Amino acid sequence: MVQNKEKYLKAKEFRQRGFTYSEISKIVGISKATVSNWFGKQSFSKKVRKDNELKARRDNVKRVSLVNKARNAERSSRYKEAIKSAETEFKHFKASPLFLTGLAIYIADGDLIHPTQIRLPNQRTSIHKIFKRFLNEFLGMERTEIYSKPHLTIVNEAVAKKKLLVWIDRLPRIVLNG
């Protein structure tokens, strides 16, 4: 039995208009459990719940799409900056034996395919040691960010990988042109 008929009628009106139990409880000033007790088993309320779920799914798809669009724009901007920076840095680094050695190691053994992962499947610790120095000195990676058992891997470093690929792309020009 409903103790406050006026609150019940207000709550029912809001529920019929598609409000959630939480929204109704705040507006009418009753607990969510009371709203659930009043309308939980009523067929119109079940339909409202299904409609609200469908609307929420559609809204979530839109929201995720907008977030992805914003992230892609940001990512694209960061990649452009990384490419520009890498081209400038290459001019300064190309005389360094460690720089050229690091690039040569990655060309010979590195993962050139995966876009966000710097991976060196070679298991020789002497190669890892040189490549870690290269990563630290030229890409600013701390040794704690680099995992090397059984092979060297750095994940989620898309900008660093982009720079590395730009440098590798520029390397043949030095070898061929001197």
Image: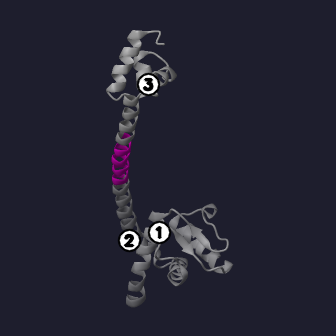
Magenta residues, dominant SS class: helix
Q: Earlier in the sequence, mark 2 or mark 1?
A: 2
Q: Which residue is at 41% across, 22% downward?
A: 24
Residue 59, percent across and down? 35, 43
For disc 1, the marked residue is 161
Quadrant of residue 7 in the image? top left
Image-based side of 85 in relation to 121, left or right: left
Residue 59 is inside the magenta segment:
yes
Quarter holding residue 39: top left
Q: Are marks 3 and 2 in contact (CB under 8 Å)?
A: no
Q: Which residue is mark 3?
A: 39
Q: Amino acid at mark 2?
A: Glu
Determine which of the numbered discs, if any, sits on residue 87 in the image: 2
Disc ID at residue 96: none
- Relative to the observer, which residue lies in front, 28 or 155? 28
Query: Which kind of residue does numbered mark 3 sit on?
Result: Phe
